[in-house]
Image (tube, helix red, strand yellow):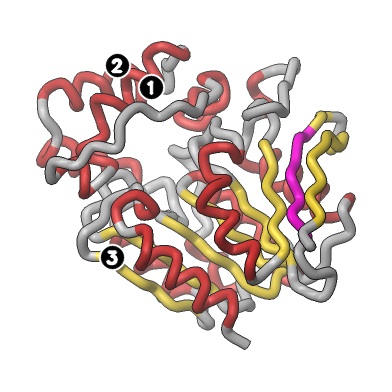
Amino acid sequence: MKKITETFITIRGTPIYYKYIQTDPSWPTLVFVPGGPGFGYGMYEERSLVLAEYVNVLLFDPRGCGKSVFEGDSNEFSLPNHILDLHALISALQLKKIILQGVSYGSIVSLGFAIDYPDLLSKLILITCSPTHKFFEVAKKTLAERGNAEQKAMCEKYLWPGKFDAQSHAEYFTVMESLYSYKAAHGHPQGTNPFKCNPAVINRGFQTEIDHFDFTSRLHAVNCPTLILAGKEDWITPLEFCEIIQRGITKSKLIVFEKASHSLYYDVPEEYNRALINFIAAI
């Protein structure tokens, strides 16, 4: 019988909301790091629950995201702080040898964590990840080649400078859906995203965090089995950066989905789940 705990815990002076699904005390725990930056775990909960048949699953809202309301300065929404928060959360819950899974910006946080704390992991899963800020300039070139006029204007006004508000962020994903999803680009739009993203968090990310981090020279520090999932048509974290990670981490495997962009779960849900389950269940 599953034991489900949903509550707040104070992490580094910040209330963090989490949901812990424990199916079997003898199983390892998979810790899921949401993307954005700015999204809570709600956007990813349904897809993560599939894995609760194989591992215990810890979902959480990073500082300022979802239910983890943060009243401090937006400078606290930094990549180093997200990594430190993750470490403090895992330590507070006394989790050992976790499986760490991150998607999009959450995969960048997860990669940084795996480099800083390699001995805490048994496995690492990186979904649409980049090890360096250099993906940003390639994404701009890809947008110039593949985006329409409205998409280019949206990125110039809001994404590149990090100047979102709640209304423009919702509009952004509507306009950009055909770039984020292969299915949407081929006539099968997903529709409106009902989950809120904190503009302050994503703005901080694009203003000061994403354009300068670089883990490339430290990838060798990751010493656990690592699964990297990528979409061939991903415009925002291009495939070439997942290939850099694969070359840099000795025990890594890269799976590329041909008919997928950044939204792997929507584009190829069955293949996506199969890849995760096979990796998690492997001895």
Q: Main secondary structure of the magenta part?
A: strand
Q: Nearer the viewer, residue 30 or 151?
A: 30
Q: Residue at x 36, y 72 (%)?
A: 255
If you read the primary sequence from the N terminus, does the residue marked by circle 2 or circle 3 appear first?
A: 2
**Residue range corresponding to the magenta coloring:** 16-22
Residue pointed to by mark 3: 257
Quarter of the image where the C terminus is located: bottom right
Q: Is residue 118 left or right of residue 243?
A: right
Q: Residue at x 36, y 25 (%)?
A: 159
Marks 1 and 3: which is nearer the front?
3
Image coordinates for residue 211, horizontal then vertical, percent: 44, 38
Q: Is residue 141 visible?
A: no
Name the amino acid type tagged 1.
Answer: Pro
Image coordinates for residue 75, horizontal then vertical, percent: 65, 24
Label ID, residue 157 = 2
Quarter of the image where the N terminus is located: bottom right
Q: Residue furthest front?
A: 1
Q: Are marks 2 and 1 in contact (CB under 8 Å)?
A: yes
Q: Residue at x 63, y 28 (%)?
A: 66
Name the amino acid type tagged 2.
Answer: Lys
Q: Is residue 279 left or right of residue 2?
A: left
Q: Nearer the viewer, residue 120 or 135?
A: 120
State the CA–CA distance, disc 1 to disc 3: 30 Å
Q: Nearer the viewer, residue 188 or 61?
A: 188
Please say whether residue 113 is one of the residues in the magenta stretch. Answer: no
Residue pointed to by mark 1: 161
